[in-house]
Image: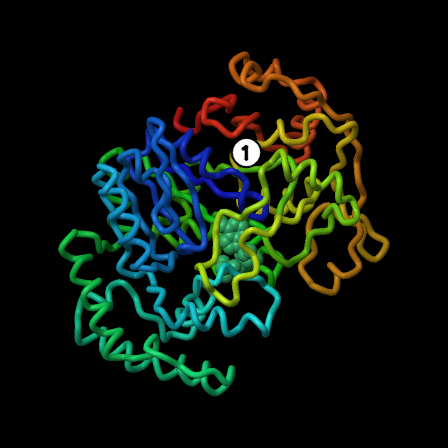
Amino acid sequence: MIVTVLGAQLGDEGKGNVIDLYGEPADVVVRYQGGDNHGHTVVVDGEEYEASQLPAGVARGAVSVIGNGCVVNLETLFDEIDSLQEQGLDPTVRVAKRAHVVLPYHRILDGATKDDDDVGTTGRGIGPTYGDKAARCGIRVGDLLDPETLRDRLEYAVPKNRATVEGFFGEETDEAFDVDRLFEIYREYGERLVEEGMPVDCGSYLQEHIDEGNEVMLQGAQGSALDMDYGTYPNVTSSNTSAGGACTGSGLSPSAIGKGEIIGVVKTYITRGANGRMPTELVGEGELASYIRDRGNEYVPKYTRDEGDEYGTIAGDPRRIGWLDMPMLRHADRVNGFTGIVVGHIDVLAGLDEIQVGHSYQIDGNETKTVPAANSEWDSCTVNYRQFEGWPDVDWSDVAQEGYEAIPENARTYLEYIETELDTPIYAVSVGPAREDTIILESPHE
Ligand code: IMP
């Protein structure tokens, strides 16, 4: 069975918990897109493990695979593996030979473009690495395994990127653009990859596991509304976060993935770490936004920029907060074909008298139930809200133990509204941050 889990909104929906929860039977956990612009903490037996390049599941003993749709920062990858080993774990990690490598100059380019756009990236070089991939001057994991190929690729790619930084951005370049230095560093990374048996042809490798009857979990990073094609372009990440990306980013076929489950993780409100469309944002409702933000502990995005990074303006800023956006969710449901959803953060909205939901948009006088495809349509978009009665703050651990019927009635009405609008069943509801705070209604593995 293949189970795909991905965020249905703007990232930070609580995917880590869901992967943790449903990941138990998984023999293999695969990241299919993104790089170290994503972060999650995995708690196993009270021990916390941090991972941004590795998939969740790494601490539980599942084989961890970085798929070919990912961009790999090898420094981060090896740091994470080393620190897991220091904590007494022995992770099995495989990296797709077709995955692209984030080089030091990609981070510089991510910073250099900062003045030029308002995307508010994580500064991890993600966009420039995917940019090189599309422009066919990227360097792949497989290129590191043969010194001659590596040198050839660097000699082709580095001058192009140097010319952009010097010519277009008018900045001086440093050792990050030194071909000889990069060659030595990345040749050594290649050697370590081989010594540890990590490079694989991802799709074939996963197929072998599937043929042996192993459970495979595909893990999305960021969220569907940050998808490069279906998200709020240009304020998106540079990869396909949606279920289509799970195919191209893992090497498994759409029919193989489609036979399994595709689970969307939904938060009862939305947050955004940076700029971009957000029609249901709580603008001018500071107190309300603070109430939700404080209870949801939404102050610091999970990713943080490097210390001393002059472009670092995001880390530590409160995330923007908005009411649940149903057009965004309907769009995600259609694009991804969710077989089930997990809804979390019910407890965060508790205590409010009234809860609003962006039920539909009004664009040029017409009601629309999904998101527009053109920026000019977004510009004229207003929101038609629906009101729901609030629910009380209760002992959520008791609720989690007692089950779905113990969820306050008004909260159940809210949940059932989401389920009906999407025509997709709720597989689980989480009422708190801990693993045991999730009420499971259906397991995708059964
Ligand atoms: P990039 O992925 O660093 O290129 O950033 C592009 C956009 O994606 C920015 O708006 C980031 O705030 C957003 N983003 C990237 N990673 C995450 C994440 O893990 N959670 C939420 N937003 C993210």
Q: Position of residue 287 (x, y in %)?
A: 75, 40
State whether residue 400 is above or below residue 135: above
- Horizontally, residue 116 falls left or right of residue 146, namely right
State whether residue 98 is above or below residue 216: below
Q: Position of residue 387 (x, y in %)?
A: 80, 33
Query: Which residue corresponds to the image point at 55% horizontal and 47% vertical from the top-left?
Result: 300
SS assignment at label 1: strand
In the rendered picture of this protein, how many numbered marks are placed on residues? 1
Q: Residue furthest bottom?
A: 167
Judge by depth and name the residue closer to the eye, 353 or 338: 353
Residue 330 visible in the shown view: yes
Q: Name the kind of residue labelled 1 in the image.
A: Ile
- Horizontally, residue 418 falls left or right of residue 429, namely right
Q: How is the image coloured?
A: rainbow
Q: Residue furthest top?
A: 402
Q: Residue furthest front?
A: 308
Mark 1 CB lies closer than 8 A to ligand 1: no
Query: Which residue corresponds to the image point at 27% horizontal and 46% vertical from the top-left?
Result: 83
- Horizontally, residue 26 falls left or right of residue 200, namely right
Query: Which residue corresponds to the image point at 43% horizontal and 40% vertical from the top-left?
Result: 4
Judge by depth and name the residue closer to the eye, 51 or 70: 51
Q: Position of residue 116 (x, y in %)?
A: 59, 74
Q: Residues within 10 Å of mark 1 (few under 14, many from 20)?
A: many
- Horizontally, residue 203 falls left or right of residue 232, namely left
Q: Quadrant of the N terminus?
A: top left
Q: Position of residue 324 (x, y in %)?
A: 68, 40
Q: Which residue is mark 1?
A: 341
